[in-house]
Amino acid sequence: MLARIQVGIKPCFTDSFGEKIKKKIQGDLKMPVESVRTIKVFTVEADISQQELLAAASGPFSDPVTQDYSLGPLSLDWKLDFDWMIEIGFRPGVTDNEGHTSAQALELLLGRKLSRDEAVYTSCQYLLSGKISQDEAETIARKGLANELIQRCTIMAKADFVKAGGLKPFAPKVAGKSEVKIAEIDLNVPDAELMRISKEGVLALTLEEMKLIRDYLTRPDIKTQRQAQGLSEKVTDVELEALAQTWSEHCKHKIFSGNIDYEDKQTGEKSQFSNLFNTCIRQPTSDIRARMGDKDWCLSVFKDNAGVIKFDDNWNVVFKVETHNSPSALDPYGGALTGIVGVNRDPFGTGMGAKLICNTNMFCFATPFYDKPIPARLLHPKRIFEGVREGVEHGGNKSGIPTVNGSLYFDDRFAGKPLVFCGTVGIMPAVINGKPSHEKKALPGDIIVMTGGRIGKDGIHGATFSSEELNENSPATAVQIGDPITQKKMFDCLLKARDRGLYRCITDNGAGGLSSSVGEMGGDTNGFELHLDKAPLKYAGLQPWEIFLSEAQERMTLAIAPEKLDDFLALCRKMDVEATVLGAFRDSGKFHCLYQGKTVAYLDMDFVHEGLPPMRMIARWRQKTYDEPRLPALPDLGRELKGLLGSLNICSKEYVVRQYDHEVQGGSIVKPLIGVDNDGPSDAAVIRPVLDSFAGLVISHGVCPRYSDIDTYHMVACSMDEAVRNALAVGANLAVMAGLDNFCWCDPILSDKTPDGDYKLAQLVRANQALAHYARAYGVPCISGKDSMKNDYLVGETKISIPPTLLFSVVAKIDDVRKAVTMDVKKAGDIVYVLGATYAELGASEYAVRHGGIGNTVPMVREKDSLPRYRCLEKAMAQGLVASCHDCSDGGLGVALAESGFAGGLGLDIDLRKVPAQGIDRDDVLLFSESQSRFVVTVAPEKSGAFEKTMADTGWARVGAVTAEPLFTVTGLTGSCVLSEKMAALKKAWQETLAF
Amino acid sequence: MTKQVKAIVLTGFGTNCETEMAHACKLGGADQVDIVHISELIHGEFSLDNYHFLNLPGGFLDGDDLGAGQAGAHRMKYAMVQSSGEKLQVQLIRFIEAGKLILGVCNGFQLMVKMGLLPGFDNRHDDRQVSLTYNDSSRFEDRWVSLAVDQDSPCVFTSGVTSLYFPVRHGEGKFVTRDEKTLQRLKDEKLIVMRYTDPKTGRPTMEYPANPNGSPEAIAGVCDPSGRLFGLMPHPEAFLHRTNHPRWTREDLPEEGQGLALFRNGINFIRKNL
């Protein structure tokens, strides 16, 4: 039967979800809706009796205390007063997690498994009342409630709804074409035709790459080998798709590994760079490791899914940060959810597999108050913000991984593509079954097993799609929805398998799906044989290439020794985790896929992985100059400070942070929200990953996209310094601090589409030079990273490119978490210090932007000054001399002081004449310059002697005191009081901007 | 008094606070603590019969699809122990009838309520008279809350404890009853063990955010009439050491976190009475 079960909160209770939707419609869409009531709809398609249907409705599908259910329209049973009915359900094939859980509940009730034709689908009905026109109802449905890429909506006026007696049941089934076909593509065609094949197939292959494939296939030896497998010199769709994804920018990092001719237009100097990744990222890490000698704590860098460092003799720590920008642009919720559950699989698939202990995130959006017309295919930035926030909430919270550190950055150039960085830290025993946990290797003869979710058309072309700008042809299939619980079940099971030694090698299925995971793991043995028809599917009708390429979530690929296979499969069965044998790893040298026994791909492993020659690119640097900001002659510093505190990049992000569980797993030491009212902005997170040890981890990050407008070299330097100083501010150990570099760039390849590609590539070169320099200077090696190079939007004439962005994430050790320090001032009478000099560096600062100019004096990192300071501060903290410590970043000293003060619920009396500074004669410049490597520190009077001695001659000064009266007073450079504001007023300004 | 206290911490299908819950049991003095996946229980590899203290930790059973704990409760009701053919529910009822202890936190509390284990009036453990529903804010929130303990409640976990400070981390924590009578009976029988309070006055409050979800009577936790089955939304296992406290860097706090007392009380009760 096909039937609908409707469930709703009893009218006597508040429908708080409905209330929330009402506020959203009123606030975001400005529509006069008076009330919203919601009803959940289960569409059951199953061979069951009416009685069984009723048992499901009254049993697992509803709560007898709080909900009513009905097999007819519940709204009519209730005699509900409403004007419009909007029902939103998923499109066929879109992951419906609640439908999936409902089906499992139904199975328990029936005592049998559902057949392939049986399923439960969920949708949500919104009953709106208010003076709303048909057009307005359509807008509410399509712009407010549904994302039509993945959802479908039905809109009916009440009269029509009543007349029709409610909605007829509809099952959004995938209508699969059942005929399996291997397409063979002739590449012996003119160039224009080759490019058409690439573009229309979303292959993102260049002409040279297409020709390379053609030439390979026409080699006589290859032709003979392929003929023996029943293949011609035409390429199969399976092969072409696999090559396109393996060679995609997303997977191959062609820009980072290419050759660059660089010219500095200012000096006329020309130079060449080959492989930025090797020279600027990997090499510095090797140098730092060599310098550490036998104290080297790096274990596995840049080779596995995530970087691995030593935590102590018993444990290793794993960290990875990824981006999920393009999918989040199309479907923010699904994109961000898959972003977080996707990056979870990286540490889980590193070494022998790590338990996940915390998540981090960093989002870049256009302003949520965006009031300009939205270009085609784009969503309003507020919708993106909300969707991403919620996706990460569900992904993190439901996976039981605390979200301990994050931030948001706003710039309208992120309207074209938002940046969604998601990171995950894991921990694994240093030794598992007698072997180092960070190493693994598949052996020839090992069985290929895929575990977890099933394969559907979701996420097909994700890798190639991310390797292009967002355009009118960007495929909706790239969008998918994650299922954290299926993944959690799989992780629970695989951790047991790991500890029992049931597998030899593990990796995740991310971009490129099986083609990537099996292809890469097959590198260990130099070959594999994969039977695509064995793969479990969500629904029938997938072509073999789709099975191979699908990026369907929640899947891991394992190599299992034949003698362990039965035990492994039995464990998976017991723990309700699907596991399927798909083939075996070989030492044949061949990338070999079959479908129902017939070969559908047969390529040399070498050709797939090494066949691509490095790209050649042109970079030309010219220093851009900007108008200086027009600073007010006599600024009202109180007003300026409040304006800055309330600006999007500085204001409180409590709205987001509160909705993330930041404490699960019990190791929370320094939380994201701290201070006397638990709402001050923490600089970094401290966690205790092993509950019976006081050794901890510090997690922080730095990001400053706007400095890229002036010079990406300094953007990177400042991002790194910010991450390092955030970590130091809570007590991290600089000697055991590792970094992760995540580059998000706009297309840096010179072309008609990107006429300034040479400049953008020069920006990338300079960024990498800074990364190499400061990694070495601070002794902070990068252990993992990622790049996403095509963060542009191009539809018609409209092009939006993001400002080049580096997110630098840090994981560091803190030897004893009881020594951690927070940023809130602690006691009246404590002495306030500023560590580090302030320079007239307003370039691209929040204050400059507030006054209409970018300026040119971008902050610089002076490591010869900062490093000794950092080392002394670390010593002072280890001795327990520091009461509070806050990093100075966006908004400068003024903002850092105000935040420390109101987080502590006390006042500050500061004298600017005492602040270490160079070349500054204005109070506003001193207060708001964003010079790097500075801290605001408070110290109890009785410890000040020891503190000052420890800090030695590292550029610090006493600048004032903490006061009992919660007032922020500042004496200016001329000796008069230039600012006097109540801390409560400052805090209010800081809190109200994003108090949604 | 020499009895070995054995605690079981149930996990799987989305539960996620099992590690700290087990840690709390150990610190609280349990002699044996096993984290057991519900599949292992269903496969008969472990049995509740061998334990005294069942911990139902927080998490998102089945993703909280169908409502928090709802699908999980349904599984507990229908699951059959494969080795013996006995319903898991029968094993559980036997556990309760033996006078053993159950502590459900957050999702564990939601599970207890949706299974009908609480409030457990008249020794009925499958009658759903109360529920936990969506917060008035309709948001999941992580925030610390002040709590007052009813000293007259029969709850064995809270003896000697008067006020507490724990985090809540939930989206569905508003406690509701089938009718007024049920609420009255909970009050009359002193089964409302814990209430959200205004940190300034120490009195139960309906004001957000001190009352984070809008629970009537500011209910944060309830027990059954025997006091041995206890469920609460706030997380005692999240405050086992002073460094878990959000203001530990600015307040003088005892080394031990306030959550530990609940576990120690439960374990001591077992040692004395079972």
Image (cartoon, coloured by chain):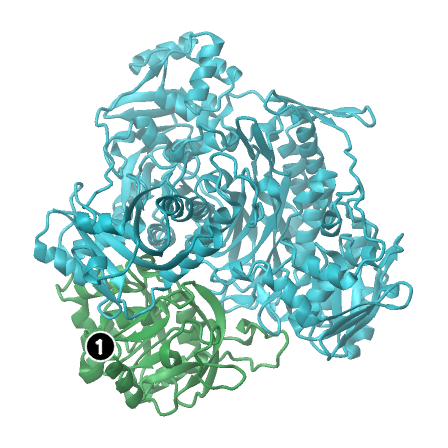
Q: Quadrant of residue A884?
A: bottom right
The answer to whether A860 appears left or right of A800 in the picture is right
Q: Which residue extends farthest bottom?
A: B152
Disc 1 secondary structure class: helix
The answer to whether B172 appears left or right of A324 in the picture is left
Q: Is residue A822 visible?
A: no
Q: In the image, is residue A233 above or below residue A404? A: above
- Residue pictured at 79% horizontal, 25% vertical: A265
Q: Position of residue A170 (x, y in %)?
A: 21, 43
- Characterize the local packing of mark 1: few (<14), some (14-19) or many (20 or more) Cα atoms within 10 angstroms: many
Q: In the image, is residue B68 above or below residue A549? A: below
- Residue pictured at 11% horizontal, 56% vertical: A52
Q: Position of residue B99 (x, y in %)?
A: 24, 83
Nearest the viewer among A825 and B11 is: A825
* Chain letter tied to cyan: A
Q: Position of residue A970 (x, y in %)?
A: 81, 68
Nearest the viewer among A536 and A352 is: A536
The chain containing the residue under callout 1 comes to B
Q: In the image, is residue B205 above or below residue B39? A: below
Nearest the viewer among B34 and A218 is: A218
Q: Which residue is mark 1?
A: B95
What amino acid is labelled 1 in the image?
Phe
Q: Is residue A901 visible?
A: yes
The answer to whether A25 appears left or right of A750 in the picture is left
Chain B, colour shown: green
